[in-house]
Image (tube, rainbow, N blue to C red):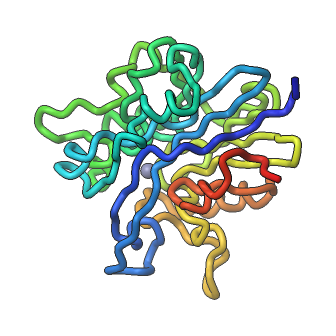
Amino acid sequence: MSDFPIIRPLLVGILQIEKSNFVYGRHQGTKIEAPCIMFVIEINGKKIVVDTGPCNPEKAAQYHGPLIQDESMYQPNVLKNNDIDPDEIEIVILSHLHWDHCSNCKIFKNATFIVQKTELQTAIAPNELQKAQYEIGFKGVIPPWIDVLPQISTVSGDVHDFEKGIHLITLPGHTPGLMGVAVETERGLYTIASDCVPLMENWYGDDKVSHIPNGLHIDLDQYEQSFKKLRDMGGIILAGHDFETLKYKVYPHE
Ligand SMILES: [Zn+2]
């Protein structure tokens, strides 16, 4: 059995949103469809989940915006169709606690949920601008991660070799405690960048800037440092909401 991990990106919903929400200062008025992605890292027969995806379309429409999620994208069905038993998952890494990354987490009954301490603290009392993203302040709505609060274990800062060859990397800017997951595969480093790099366009930048922040952010100086950190790490970026990420069923790819 290979010692090297592989990464599988799984489609768990499609947001219908303003492109400027993702690409700061650009594409105002342009509507796009953007996938929500759950990642499964496999290493030595063990499976680690990164992000659990969005809530159902009805709740999304009420509090956030239009979301497509047919039966085939519903998280329990996605796992089943990929021969993954949620009960076998011991670790779920949550990149951050926005609704479209941590809903339906209670399907992982036996998992410990890894979150940056700063992110958990932020999710309780977020900046007003991000209250909706954290589902805080909607009457009668309990934020999704509360379902698994007793299963949450926090980390502070980067964690090198969280599992052999799998590193937790802080990438603040979009949120204070956003965390990417860098995976050393047989063919080099792949980093699950979550909403630090929602679209590859954010990563490639344009003629004005080398990288473009997410339209939703809390600190542009931190954001710039996070981009620099990703650049220094090298390797391949897997964007958080880009169909490009779903181009291959498994990373590394042939
Ligand atoms: Zn987010």
Residue 160 screen position, x and y as percent: 77, 32
Look at 55% across and 50% down and name the residue there: 194
Count the labels in the image: 0
**Is residue 222 in sight in this rendering?**
no
Residue 120 relative to residue 41: left or right: left
Location of residue 44 by image quarter: top right
Q: Residue at x 62, y 51 (%)?
A: 193
Find residue 215 and report its image quarter.
bottom left
Q: Where's residue 125, x and y in %?
A: 31, 38
- The percent coordinates of residue 195 (x first, y second) are 51, 54
| Residue nearest the viewer, comparing 213 with 53 | 53
- Can you say which quadrant of the picture contains the N terminus? top right
- Residue at left 59%, top 39%? 39
- Rendering quarter of residue 121: top left
Q: Position of residue 33 (x, y in %)?
A: 40, 65
In the figure, is residue 130 to the left or right of 22? left
- Identify the residue shown where x is 52% and y is 64%: 220
Left or right of residue 113, residue 133 in this image: left
Q: From this view, report whether residue 225 is shown above or below residue 167.
A: below
Q: Residue furthest bottom?
A: 207
Q: Is residue 84 visible?
A: yes
Position of residue 94 in the picture relative to residue 5 (left or right): left
